[in-house]
Amino acid sequence: MKHILNGLQKSAKDKHNENKKYFDKLKKKTPKNLDYVMQEIHDKEFKKTDCLKCANCCKTTGPLFTLADIERIAKHLRQKPHQFIDQYLHIDEDNDYVLQQVPCTFLDNENYCMIYDVRPKACREFPHTDRKKFQQISDLTLKNVAICPAAYNIVEEMKKRMPL
């Protein structure tokens, strides 16, 4: 997996301008069936992708924590929300709650999430390639293709299936 992730950084960088142009066109002229096709591509990719072999998202980035996430996770950990915040989070430059450190504190040695059932919404939805109105998150997707091999493959398949 390590060699795939090392190659992913380079491949994503090499494709960045091409992908940016593609997404700029996509925003201007969004195909009517975009959400349907994206769901199909996403589902097909995640039938063959094992996130437990990778967990690069958990190792290199931190999710945003909503107040609902904080309350749910704190309850699960039998803490008060302010205790959870003090122990694990800080407020970033965008005024969002994020992890104090990466890799994620809740990732174990076998890439399992110790709070999987109550994980943040951002983690549940990552890499967001099955999101409705996908064209609205192109900036996020450009970042995610450098982090997630599945997101990279999904964007490459998307460009083949929906040339603009």
Image (cartoon, helix red, strand yellow):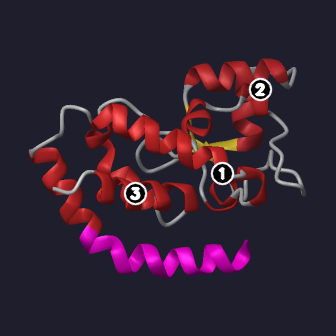
Secondary element at image label 1: helix
Residue at point 35%, 53% (across, down) = 158
Assess whether residue 116 is covered by the magenta stretch.
no
Residue at point 38%, 51% (across, down) = 140
What x and y, as percent, mark residue 11?
Answer: 46, 78
Amino acid at the residue labelled 1: Lys
Secondary element at image label 2: helix
| Residue bearing the label numbered 2 | 117
Secondary element at image label 3: helix
| Crowd tier of the residue under label 2, counting other residues whose Cα lies within 10 Å: few below 14, some 14–19, many 20 or above | few
Mark 1 or mark 3: whose residue is earlier in sequence: 1
| Residue bearing the label numbered 1 | 48
Mark 2 or mark 1: whose residue is earlier in sequence: 1
- Separation of marks 1 and 3 at Cα, in angstroms: 14 Å
What x and y, as percent, mark residue 85?
Answer: 69, 34
Q: Which residues are magenta?
A: 1-18
The answer to whether 94 appears left or right of 29 in the picture is right
| Contact, mark 1 vs mark 3 (Cβ under 8 Å) | no
Q: Which mark is residue 107?
A: none
